[in-house]
């Protein structure tokens, strides 16, 4: 592994850990602010948007890239933001009809989509160790999530599961779009444009949902600010930054660290149980990621 790819891998891991705070922070914001899930998704990108644009426009290199993007057309830069908005929307909507564990597990099936597309169309060289590692990591996530949750008996369970599967497709499309665009555009510009696009779409969705849009407490605003800074600005930013030096297929497998880290935060901050079986499942995910790296 070269020094550049090693640094990119560490950046990706930090990004995965940062986005693992998304679920706990969104849950705290919704509970303390009497908000709907779609509203929390909107504020995640709405608060992050001006922060990202300030950093982007203060970067001299990014300003040059931004000028070139204006000349060359903005349409292609909007694509990742559209995928990310639908990723957040379908995942949050799935909670109404299926368990959070099932929604998270099915959303992580995006690993399969990214791996296939990366191998078939992006010319990423993968061998049997990648497939085995991805399967082991995904199995570890299934063990972690389903081992502590009883299945929900709901007449519309299938609807929720299908929404979660569509989340996997949208997030995989987001990662792949970012991977392709990173060859010509800077990470800051892509994050700023994508976040703005997502904010516009999620604002419309929040209005249509007729759920409370504004949080009712100061504490909820604090959770929303942290949600925008840690999982979105830092987490997604580090992930996009790493894509210039890493295969998209490997990045997708590494992002399976997210549910493992989320379980740890739930244990530390939300009094959610974490026993030896869950710890073993987390180690299984890490083993799978190492194998996938060796085979990609």
Image (cartoon, rainbow, N blue to C red):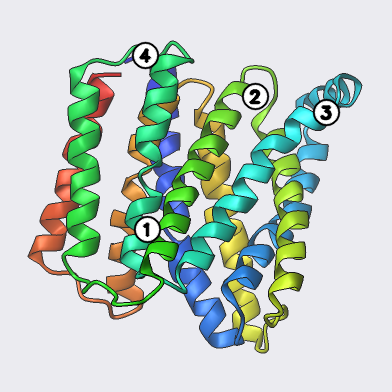
| Camera-side mark, 4 or 3 | 3
Mark 4 or mark 1: name the one nearer the start of the chain.
4
Q: Position of residue 261 (x, y in %)?
A: 32, 56
| Neighbour tally class for label 4: few under 14, some 14-19, many 20 plus, Cα within 10 Å | few
Q: Toward the viewer: 257 or 11? A: 257
Residue 136 position by quadrant: top left
Q: Which mark is residue 2?
A: 4
Residue 147 visible at all: yes
| Camera-side mark, 2 or 3 | 2
Mark 4 or mark 3: name the one nearer the start of the chain.
4
Residue that appears at 76% across and 72% down: 207
Question: Callout 4: helix, strand or loop?
Answer: loop
Residue that appears at 51% across and 27% down: 243
Q: Quadrant of the C terminus?
A: top left
| Camera-side mark, 2 or 4 | 2
| Camera-side mark, 2 or 1 | 1
Question: Callout 1: helix, strand or loop?
Answer: helix
Residue 9 visible at all: no
Residue 70 position by quadrant: top right
Q: Toward the viewer: 195 or 151? A: 151
Q: In which quarter of the image is the N terminus?
A: top left
Q: Is residue 248 left or right of residue 289?
A: right
Label 4, label 1: how many angstroms apart (C-alpha)?
33 Å
Q: What residue would you read off at disc 3?
A: 66
Q: What residue would you read off at disc 2?
A: 181
Query: 215 above or below 116?
Result: below
């Amino acid at each position: 592994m070269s020094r550049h790819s090693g640094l990119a891998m560490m950046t990706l891991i930090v990004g995965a850990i940062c986005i693992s705070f998304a679920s706990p922070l969104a849950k705290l914001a919704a509970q303390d602010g009497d908000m709907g899930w779609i509203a929390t998704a909107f504020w995640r990108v709405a608060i992050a948007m001006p922060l990202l644009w300030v950093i982007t426009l203060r970067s001299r290199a990014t300003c040059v890239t931004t000028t070139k993007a204006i000349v060359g057309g903005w349409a292609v830069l909007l694509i990742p933001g559209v995928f990310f908005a639908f990723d957040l929307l379908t995942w949050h909507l799935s909670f109404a009809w299926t368990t959070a564990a099932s929604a998270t597990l099915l959303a992580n099936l995006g690993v399969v989509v990214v791996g296939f597309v990366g191998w078939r169309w992006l010319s990423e060289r993968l061998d049997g160790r990648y497939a085995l590692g991805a399967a082991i990591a995904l199995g570890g996530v299934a063990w972690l999530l389903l081992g502590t949750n009883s299945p929900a008996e709901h007449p519309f369970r299938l609807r929720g599961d299908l929404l979660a599967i569509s989340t996997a497709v949208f997030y995989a499309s987001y990662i792949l779009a970012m991977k392709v665009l990173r060859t010509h555009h800077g990470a800051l510009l892509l994050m700023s444009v994508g976040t703005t696009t997502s904010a516009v779409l999620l604002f419309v969705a929040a209005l249509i949902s007729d759920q409370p849009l504004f949080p009712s407490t100061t504490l909820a605003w604090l959770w929303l600010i942290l949600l925008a800074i840690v999982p979105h600005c830092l987490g997604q930013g580090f992930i996009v930054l790493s894509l210039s030096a890493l295969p998209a297929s490997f990045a997708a497998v590494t992002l399976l660290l997210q549910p493992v880290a989320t379980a740890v935060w739930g244990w530390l901050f939300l009094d959610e149980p974490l026993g030896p079986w869950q710890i073993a499942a987390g180690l299984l995910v890490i083993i799978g990621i190492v194998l996938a790296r060796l085979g990609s």
